[in-house]
Each structure stands twice: as C-alpha cells, then as structure tokens.
Image: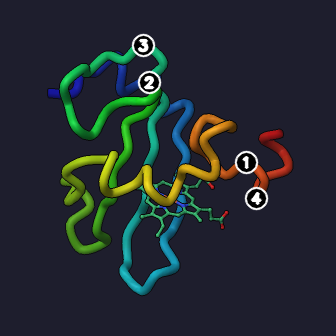
Amino acid sequence: MIAGTSLRVAWQQLAVAILALGAKGWFVMVKDSNNSHPGNSLWGDGWASSWFDAGNPTKTTSTDYKKDCLPCHVPARATDWVYTSGYPALK
Ligand code: HEC
C-alpha cells in the first residue's frame, strides 16, 4: 500500500521517460530517500521504479525493479541511477 504522504512528496521529484523500445507506456521513478517501503520489490536503492503500459496506466506491470530496471541502469549508478548525462540541467 502506498502512503499518500510519501507519494505526494515523491511526485515532486518524479522523473518520467517515454520508452523507445516499441512498447507504449512510461518508465516512472519516484524518489524515496527514506526507504519507506522496505521489503517491497518495486521500492529500493532510493527510488520506487515501475513501468506503466499506456493501455492500462493505473497499475504497473513491473514486479521487481532489480530485474526490470537496474541491469540497464548500472552505468548510471554514480548519479543515483539516473542518466543525468542526458539532462544537462540535472548536473
Ligand atoms: C533496456 C535497458 C533499460 C531498462 C530495462 C530500463 N531502463 Fe530506464 N533508461 C535506460 C537508458 C539507456 C536511459 C537513458 C535514455 C536517454 O537518456 O535517452 C533510461 C532512462 C530512464 C529514465 C529517465 C531518467 C534517466 O535516467 O535518464 C527513467 C525515469 C527510467 N529510465 C526508468 C526506468 C525504470 C523505472 C525501469 C524499470 C521499470 C527502467 N528504466 C528500465 C535503459 C533502461
């Protein structure tokens, strides 16, 4: 269950990317510095991380960010898992 407060705070730091791999939907990362959902496989390493299909955007189809997201984001580990090199304003 996602607590309203942490979600509201998190929205302020929301980062959204539109996938370019053919599927339609959104990669969503919500900052969570407090590790507020320990044991939840979509939360950890400072973020909530999920994929949302355009056809069903209210519920994520991701199950485990360590499998669904981290393998590709390892090169961006030093910048908090975000590819800041693509966004000069974030540097
Ligand atoms: C196939 C490899 C791959 C997978 C799997 C992947 N990502 Fe990414 N992601 C990337 C790359 C590469 C970029 C940078 C793209 C760019 O800058 O144009 C990126 C960018 C992003 C961004 C935009 C911010 C940034 O870091 O540039 C977000 C948010 C994001 N990914 C979230 C996720 C989430 C959440 C998951 C898991 C549900 C995920 N990604 C899975 C490769 C991947």
Number of numbered discs overlaid on the protein picture: 4
Q: Do the residues labelled 2 and 3 touch (CB within 8 Å)?
A: yes
Neighbours of disc 2 within 10 Å: few (<14), some (14-19), many (20+): many
Query: Disc 3 and disc 4: Cα gap in Å?
Result: 26 Å
Q: Are marks 1 and 4 in contact (CB under 8 Å)?
A: yes
Q: In this view, does 54 lie to the left or right of 28?
A: left
User: Which residue in the protein does label 3 denote?
Assistant: 34
Query: Disc 3 and disc 1: Cα gap in Å?
Result: 22 Å
Neighbours of disc 1 within 10 Å: few (<14), some (14-19), many (20+): some
**Above-or-below relation of 12 to 35:** below
The reply to whether the residue tagged 2 has its Cβ within 8 angstroms of ligand 1 is no
Query: Disc 2 and disc 1: Cα gap in Å?
Result: 18 Å
**Residue in view at x 63 percent, y 52 percent:** 75
Tell me the amino acid under the disc marked 2. Answer: Asp
- Residue 52 image point, x, y percent: 31, 60
Tell me the amino acid under the disc marked 3. Answer: Asn
User: Which residue in the protein does label 2 denote?
Assistant: 32
Q: Are marks 3 and 4 in contact (CB under 8 Å)?
A: no
The reply to whether the residue tagged 1 has its Cβ within 8 angstroms of ligand 1 is yes
Residue 40 falls in image quadrant: top left
- Residue 11 image point, x, y percent: 47, 33
**Above-or-below relation of 60 to 34:** below
User: Which residue in the protein does label 4 denote?
Assistant: 86
- Label 2: which secondary element: loop
Query: Disc 2 and disc 3: Cα gap in Å?
Result: 5 Å
Which label was assigned to residue 9? none
Tell me the amino acid under the disc marked 1. Answer: Thr
User: Which residue in the protein does label 1 denote?
Assistant: 84
**Above-or-below relation of 32 to 17:** above
Query: Disc 1 and disc 4: Cα gap in Å?
Result: 5 Å
Could you tell which of marks 2 and 1 lies nearer the N-terminus? 2
